[in-house]
Amino acid sequence: MEVVHLTDPLKLACGYSLAEHVLCVETYGQLNRSKSNAVLICHALTGSHHAAGWHVGDKKPGWWDDVIGPGKSIDTDQFFVVSPSNIGTCHGSTGPLSINPKTNSTWGPNFPKLHISDWTASQRMLMDHYKIKCWAAVVGGSLGGMQAMHWSVTYPDRLLSAVVIASAMKLSAQNIAFNEIARRAIKEDTDFHGGRYQEKNKKPLRGLALARMIGHVTYLSDLSMAEKFGREVLSGDFCNEKLESVKFKIESYLNYQGDKFANGFDANSYILLTKMLDYFDLAREYDNQPSSAFRVATCKFLVLTFSSDWRFPPERSREITKALITAGCDVTHAEITSSLGHDAFLLPNSRYQQIFSTFMRRVASTLER
């Protein structure tokens, strides 16, 4: 992991300017002589720079280890892969846990509001650090896919390909509603203290765990939960008068996931990032015409979606593909059959990985050596 110190000012969409900022970055593979083989990985909502491989003490590898590595879809024998934690996150990059130089205390709830354009602008600055002129590909799933689309219309001459997986050009009202319920859960925790919990040496663990549980359910599918957990009971007896003692396997799983997340993530970051996700609308600045947004894009696109994803359903990817075709873009679209819901883009699937690999091999074949 490298801590990259970017010293040029970053003007944020909200009007605030960060005089400087840091990004925690992991890289995989080697940058070739012409610096033409770099791939940017855009993480999703709670992702980090640790996208692949193992750290000492890890119980599992990086979050996208199934597709990044030698011989995998993003082949590190072919590509130099750059995976940053974006600003506003809590994995070491500049965010709410960082020190505000003007107050000499942590930013906390006062960290500036973010737009996806701020992430892509920061990533654009990261290119200069590595002396990369053009990405071979910008790749991301979910919120990461939104970044890939934004790259294609904001810096069209700086990427050759964009891979947009399980994403959308804007969130539905239902998605925004789920995010607001999660934020409310955090803010109602008595240890939240208006976001100033660090000053109180507290952390809203209960609210953050509940927020994660709400989100996690939306990342799964009914079928995947049925297949993995069903109605299996871990403890208790339905014949006992105290039915509250009955504990289902799915309850145990969600409580475990919620508690694990709460102990490893920051509440202010979660609130900040979900609001950023809610606000994103690729076509807002183009008279709400998605095809108009893509007319400046010159890269090739791969758009992938999963049949059981109800958080970012296949219809959203079809909308992206239709807009790209209308704009005259080169696009490949595939819908992958899966029972695993939105999380499918993070998990092994032979057809998914085959299509992804084929596209990336084509990218590799066009690179200057």
Image (cartoon, grey):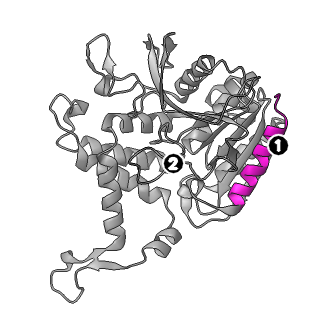
Q: Position of residue 253 (x, y in %)?
A: 35, 65
Q: Position of residue 130 (x, y in %)?
A: 62, 21
Q: Nearer the viewer, residue 121 or 293?
A: 121
Q: Earlier in the sequence, mark 2 or mark 1?
A: 2
Which residue is depicted at the point 79% across and 50% down? 358
The residue identified by callout 1 is 362
Q: What is the chief secondary structure element of the magenta stretch? A: helix
Q: Position of residue 249 (x, y in %)?
A: 34, 72
Q: Secondary structure at mark 1?
A: helix
Which residues, given as a range, are shown in magenta? Answer: 351-369
Instruction: Give the image quarter of residue 354.
Output: bottom right
Query: Is 296 situated above or below 180?
Result: above
Left or right? Give the position of 243 relative to 214: left
Quick one: which residue is furthest to the bottom in this view? 239
Crowd band around label 2 with a 10 angstrom C-alpha radius: few (<14), some (14–19), many (20+): some
Query: Is 179 situated above or below 147?
Result: below
Tell me the kind of residue under disc 1. Arg
The residue identified by callout 2 is 63
Q: Secondary structure at mark 2?
A: loop
